Amino acid sequence: MTPELVTRLTEQMRYEFARTAPPDGFPRFPDIPVERFTSDEFWELESEHLWPKVWVIAGRVDDVPNVGDFITFDDLGPPMILVRGRDKQVRAFYNTCQHRGAPVVREAKGTSKLLRCQYHSWSYDIDSGRLVSVPDERDFVGLDKSQRCLATIRCEVWDGWIFLNQDPDAMPLTDWLGPIPSELAELQGPRLRTVARESEVVPCNWKVTAEAFLEVYHFKHIHSRGGDSLLDNRGAVMSLLPNGNSRMITPYSKATFSALGMQDFDDYKHIVLPGFEDIDTVNDMVRCTSSAYSVFPNLITPIAAYGFPFITFWPIDKRTTRIDWTHYAPIDFDPTDGLPDLWRGRLANFAQIMAEDFWNMAPMQKSLESPAMRGVPINYQERRIWHFHEQLDTMVGRDRIPTELQVAQLIGPYIER
């Protein structure tokens, strides 16, 4: 973040604390149709027209550090494989042999000089996916190996994170992310390593899980500690960014900032947590607030100077979602040898926060499917949720969505350009 952005966000926090109503002219949101979370029709629209067209995180470059290293990725449905080629580039292919459809690799990860199907040993080059070897090729009449390459998938890397997009015509990843790469450059992404991965399956629609991380309206009700909240949602700044992405900066509560030696919410200090490797380039506002970014459609990251998680939401079916959270940090130890006590404590604390959210999410699907639920009203604090739903409709195509399932396009004037 630039000093100018920090100053602007701080001024916006002061405005949020002082306001007595939403800004003049801010639109009233109609209810979000409940059927967006419950109907087979909307689920099928998302499956066919959303997920095949969006950038999603698929791994980290340290998952495939050496030539020939590969990992499989099945979270979008079709089986895929990421592999590092001889030119050190990471590429993605559908994990589908072009002979009889068997997977090219069956292991979750490994190393290979060729991608060799274990059914009949059709073999493919790791750089291009080109079919290079067919056992008993003489028995195939007119086989053109150049037409039987592995199907490729768009694969791009941002600061060490690998993203995939099944749409060959999608905009470049850095364009999709908008200002996020420049604002998060201070996290020194290429320097980070994977600390730990955790996962939970929650019985609710994936949008219910994502929405929980797009507002802090719920925070003091779900995450209070002995009646006190770490954050003060009254000062939260919700920034709507292009392509459904967003930013949320929430000041600490008085009890929290006082414990840190701050005189007020904006008395930012260069706080360094003892025992953790520090990312010294992280600005002081981030160190003294809860700062989070969302990348549409399914990635949230609450950033910090000593490391942070990427939280992702993967739909399993209409009523079930797998939530993953992977912590990254500038660590000076090998996580496979075990984690230091400080990191174990940090992960346990974050898992408790996640469990509190899961406790709240789990019964929501049943309630959303109740005849008592007529619609979902959204307030000014929750405007990131409306922004999320508008982008969802844009990606699916409004002409494909029945009128009664759409959300109105209202948020455009409030998107930072």
Image (cartoon, rainbow, N blue to C red):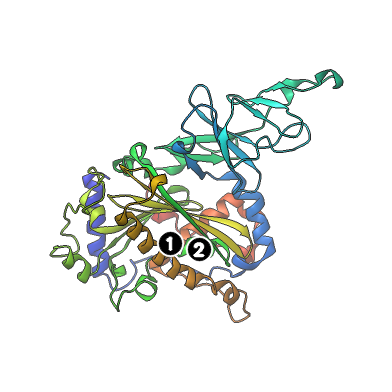
Residue 357 visible? The answer is yes
> Compared with residue 296, is residue 403 higher up or lower down, i.e. above or below?
below
Inspect this view and state whether residue 238 appears: no
Mark pair 2, 1: CA separation: 7 Å
Above or below: residue 242 compared with residue 39:
above
Q: Residue 213 carries which label?
A: 1
Q: Quadrant of the N terminus?
A: top left
Picture quarter containing residue 234? bottom left
Residue 383 percent location from the top left of the image: 42, 63
Residue 327 x/y as whole percent: 40, 51
**Figure quadrant of residue 232:** bottom left
The amino acid marked with disc number 2 is Thr
Q: Which residue is drawn at 27% across and 70% down?
A: 19
Q: What residue type is labelled 1?
A: Phe
The residue indicated by pointer 2 is 209
Classed neighbour count for the residue bearing mark 1: other residues with Cα under 10 Å, few (<14), some (14–19), many (≥20): many
Q: Horizontal and vertical percent for residue 41?
A: 69, 61
Could you tell whether 84 is left or right of 380 in the image? right
- SS type, badge 2: helix
Is the Cβ of the residue at disc 2 closer than 8 Å to that at disc 1? yes
Picture residue at 17% right of the left edge, 56% below the top: 268
Bin the neighbour count of mark 2 within 10 Å (Cα to Cα): few under 14, some 14-19, many 20 and up: many
Most extreme residue toward the bottom is 372
- Left or right of 394 on screen, residue 290: left
Classify 107 as above or below 392. Answer: above
Describe the element under mark 1 as helix, strand or loop.
Answer: loop
Q: Residue at 36% across / 51% down in the picture? A: 339
Numbered circle sitting on residue 22: none
